[in-house]
Amino acid sequence: MADPHPKSNLTYSKNTKIAWIAARVLNETFAKQCAEKSEYSLEELRKMVIPLTREDLYLNFARNLRFRDMRNHEDTQIFPLLDRFWDSFEQIKEALDLGGETITADFFRKGHSTNQSLQSYAEGCRRHDATFNPKLWVGQEKEFISYYMCQHDNAKRRNNLDSIRKQICHLEGRPYRMELIKAILGRHDLDLKDLIDSGDTETYEALLTKNNIKPHPDDVFIPLDKDGNANFKNITQFNHFGKWALLFKKYGHKIDVKDLKRKYGTNNSIVEEMYSSCIPIVFDAKIWDGQLDGMIELWDSVSTTTKKAYIEVFWENYVILEDKSYRFPYKIDPRLKKAALDWPLRQDGLPETMTAYGTQKFWSNFDKIQDIMIKHGTPITVSDLVKPVGDAGETVLMKAVKFGSLYEVLSTIDPEKGEYLTVDDLTKENKFDVTALDYIIDNGQLEELFDVRIWRGNPEGMKAVWEAVPDCVEKRLIRDFGYRMAQVNRENLRRPIRKKPRLAP
């Protein structure tokens, strides 16, 4: 299907835009006056299509007219106040498409600056039905439904929802899906709403695929009733959310966050209907695999009150995806520079908070990368491990431990240069209150953390870290900590005392 919104790189003056609309809306006399201030003749304007934006529709055209009564008549200074503007809106839509403007519910419903909404002006001209023209909504069926649900009863009675949706589908060259599904389920005395309520994805999938129709998210995320109520409104329905999402993923459909945020009429969106206890279900990492940014976008739309009780659960799921989503982007060869390791990685062309240090490939190839850095005279040190990476409040150190690379971490410690891990490094919490020390304990590697070789010259630091370790089985298994501490203390006593530098007189 061709791009419904081809963009034009040409730019046109305000007067030309006014004249172009005037050529379609005003009478011959007024249209010619507007064209006099344009770079084009009226005949040329009528043959061409120029790019327009929604803002251009509010341009004051009366100032381009010579008639004083028209210039001073505030009620007729913008095009949407004129009947012929709405009679010509199909042509104007072509210009909006060329300008990259998309028709949405808000396109008509929201005002501009001090002006009213386009919907209000259409109603004032008794041309409200012009906004229901199926040709305006090609590619935007869900936005049309959202717009339709906002209308008063008289408008709904004059414009049948199913009929217009069917025409939109016809213009897009596809069947009206909802009609097909109703027919398929109806043959078995089933109703889609009942399947959504019970979470019976198995019956839904079986009957559709039997009729060569693949499951699609629109079937459950678009409201089924005429009032626009979301299909997910209670705990029982939300309990089945994960089943539906995973089914659609099986057929190649990722969750579209817009579907969960879209309001139909004045009703709450799906995300607005969400209960706190639904967060572990809706934000399950399996559902969002490959959609890290979408997961964050939806989370940002959840109310603060709803987030509060389960904020740790969200970040636990998020970090699972974060750890598997990012790839090490560089070739591991002598040309690799340390500065590149700090550059933000990109997802979909946009810079992220993640760096190469937070990727699994970095740590599985740490020895090779470190050899390259040493040859450049810029080795990776302990100070590089405390840097934050990603959105979950984790540090490089936390990522490394989770990736099973504690030994590589310990290799960066250099007692001769006074470079050690500190209590702060090990006990800094991420956004779900987990620390690098917690990860080390969970991995069963606490003993390695107290290797006496990495604490030479720093018995105080070793003792402080030991005291920061919570009482746990792993700590109790290190029965010789006192002996290790004594070794570090003895070695510290043997170290030569550094003389203080003499101060210049």
Image: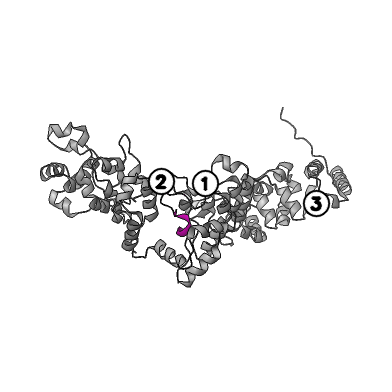
Gap in angstroms between the C-alphas marked 3 and 1: 56 Å
Tell me the quarter of the picture where residue 418 sits. top right
Type of amino acid at the residue the image marks with label 3: Arg
In x, y percent, where is residue 181? 44, 64
Q: Earlier in the sequence, mark 1 or mark 2?
A: 2
Colour option used: one colour
Magenta stretch bounds: 218-229
For the residue pair 448 and 371, the one nearer the viewer reads as 448
Q: Is residue 98 above or below residue 59?
A: below
Question: Gap between marks 1 and 2, in whole Å?
Answer: 14 Å
- For the C terminus, give its image quadrant: top right
User: Does residue 464 show up magenta in the picture?
Assistant: no
The label nearer to you, 2 versus 3, is 2
Whole-number angstrom distance, CA of label 2 to CA of label 3: 67 Å
Amino acid type indicated by mark 2: Gly
Q: Is residue 500 left or right of residue 315?
A: right
The mark found on residue 265 in the picture is 2
Q: Which residue is mark 3?
A: 453
Instruction: Give the side of residue 70 with respect to residue 419, left or right.
Output: left
User: From where the camera sits, is residue 383 visible?
Assistant: yes
| Quadrant holding the N terminus | bottom left
Q: Residue at x 83, y 42 (%)?
A: 496
Q: Residues within 10 Å of mark 3 (few under 14, many from 20)?
A: some
Q: Which residue is mark 1?
A: 273
Q: Nearer the viewer, residue 469 or 182?
A: 182
Q: Amino acid at mark 1?
A: Glu
Going from N to C along the chain, the mark reached first, 2 or 3, is: 2
Q: Residue furthest left?
A: 29
Question: Can I make out residue 357 in this image?
Answer: no
Disc nearer the start of the sequence (3/1)? 1
Taking the spot 30% from the left edge, 40% from the top edge, the residue there is 120
